Image: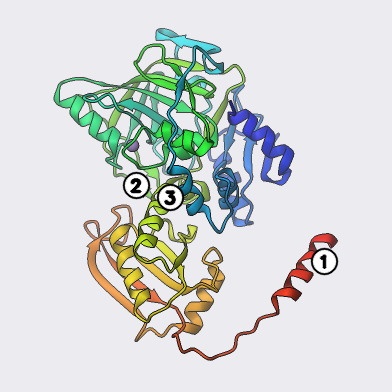
Amino acid sequence: MEDLHTFIETLEARFPNEILRVGEMVTGKYDTTAYAVELEKEGKYPVLVFENVKNSSFHIVSNVFASRERLARMLGGNIGNLYDAWNEKLNYLIKPEIVDSGPVKQIKKKGGETNLNDFPIPIHFEGDAGPYVTAGIFVAKDPDTGRRNLSYHRMQLKGENRFGISIHSRGHLWDYLRRASKEGRDLDVAVVIGAHPLIYLGASANVPVDEYEVAGALMNKPVELVKCETVDLEVPSNAEIVMEGRILHDICEPEGPFSEYTGYLTHRSTQNVLEINTVTHRKDAYFQDIVPGRSAEHLLLGGVGREASTFKRLKAVVPYVREINYPSSGTHFHCYVSMKKVAEGQPRQVLMLLFGLDPYVKLAVVVDDDIDVNNESEVLWAMATRMQADRDIIVIPKALGNLLDPSSSEGMSAKLGVDATKPLNWRIGECRTPKKIVEQIRDCLKNSS
Ligand code: MN
């Protein structure tokens, strides 16, 4: 079965420009993050493999999810149909399979042998409370029904066997812990660090099913799982690193601040504690990292599942919607929608629906389908030339928003909706070259480069 190693090998063979192997020594203190941030400023989003990490034999792999194009390709789509590709695959969930063993069991460290300081856990940004594991997939089971769940939560290194964690998204894991705590029990978890990217994408889905089934759907085959050593949980047989332990039910400790996707430090935290008692990993394990803050990969990995679901529901009501894009400049708060308008007033219908479906969105722009929503410059051109502020803007004050938006008050935001579509009776010619010529010239340019 494919894993992070085979993914990187295949990527390197087919798209060598999408991977950057860094031979220079890094410490993991700010520098791995700085690589990703500086490359992003140049419009480059390679997977980063840090081969020379000070005081560690592990390689750090980062930035896997930074490119929208790469992410779309993983789903068998392209940049223009990313959400359709995701939604299509989610129609056919595939149950995982249990196997006897796998590479993740090559090294086992139990009880007193485990020491989290063995791993090159980075410090990402100034102001972060300490080193953070950012690519940890939490595996847990519903204490009442046994249903399995996968989710992400930030993990602040607190000691040889201890993490501070925040479950502020208040999803399934938070609910499991709440119910276990009521009965005076800790919650067993396994944390997967490093796996095939489609397992990460599957785990990012916010759906009321076992996310391994979503990962199976994305991979078109069952995810192979092995049983954990000390907890009744299952992890991918070829994961890189797995940590087993429990979230304590009766202790809260300060956790954070941490650099969140808004681009700001946040103190918001549920302040839970995770104790690790067993670690298993591959001999050649990569230590995977997700660049936090408002990095492209943090936004894409955190967004695609919710955005695809919003897109599906929006299109179910207004089939004239063509594409949506949540630009990284908007950190989940801005959304561009293109549509083939057939009646005046439809863009406002879309705006109202969108604000209702996704409370994160505070600025939404509707454009015609000749505008590429994945090209921010085209969207701004449409706003510059097809929109008048006195007639094409709606503002909805005091609606449910996102608590991490530092400009919001008490979790409420004003919503700004912009209709940047042309009127139906628009008769103004645009500067365009004939399609046939454009295709010819594209071929010429391709051959000459
Ligand atoms: Mn879930």
Which class describes the residues within 10 Å of circle 2: few (<14), some (14-19), or many (20+)? some
Closer-to-camera residue (109/74): 74
* Horizontal arrangement in the rendering, residue 446 relative to residue 295 (left or right): right
**Tag 2 residue:** 266
Which residue is at the far bottom?
427
Is residue 317 in view?
yes
**Marks 2 and 3, the one that precedes in the sequence:** 2
Residue 204: x and y in percent read: 42, 40
In the image, 9 versus 254, the foreground residue is: 9
Q: Nearer the viewer, mark 2 or mark 3?
A: 3
Q: Is the C-beta separation of discs 2 and 1 under 8 Å?
A: no
Marked residue nearer the N-terminal end (3 or 1): 3
- SS under mark 1: helix
**View extreme (right): residue:** 448
Q: Earlier in the sequence, mark 2 or mark 1?
A: 2
Residue drawn at the location 29% of the way across and 44% of the way down? 268
Disc number placed over residue 409 in the picture, else none: none
Q: CA distance from mark 2 to mark 1?
A: 50 Å
From the top left corner, tell me how far across and down residue 179 is, in percent: 18, 28
Q: CA distance from mark 2 to mark 3?
A: 19 Å
The amino acid sitting under disc 2 is Thr
Circle 3: element type: helix
Q: Amino acid at mark 3?
A: Gly
Q: Which residue is mark 1?
A: 444
Ligand 1's quadrant: top left
Judging by the rendered image, the residue that carries numbered circle 3 is 303
Quadrant position of residue 128 = top left
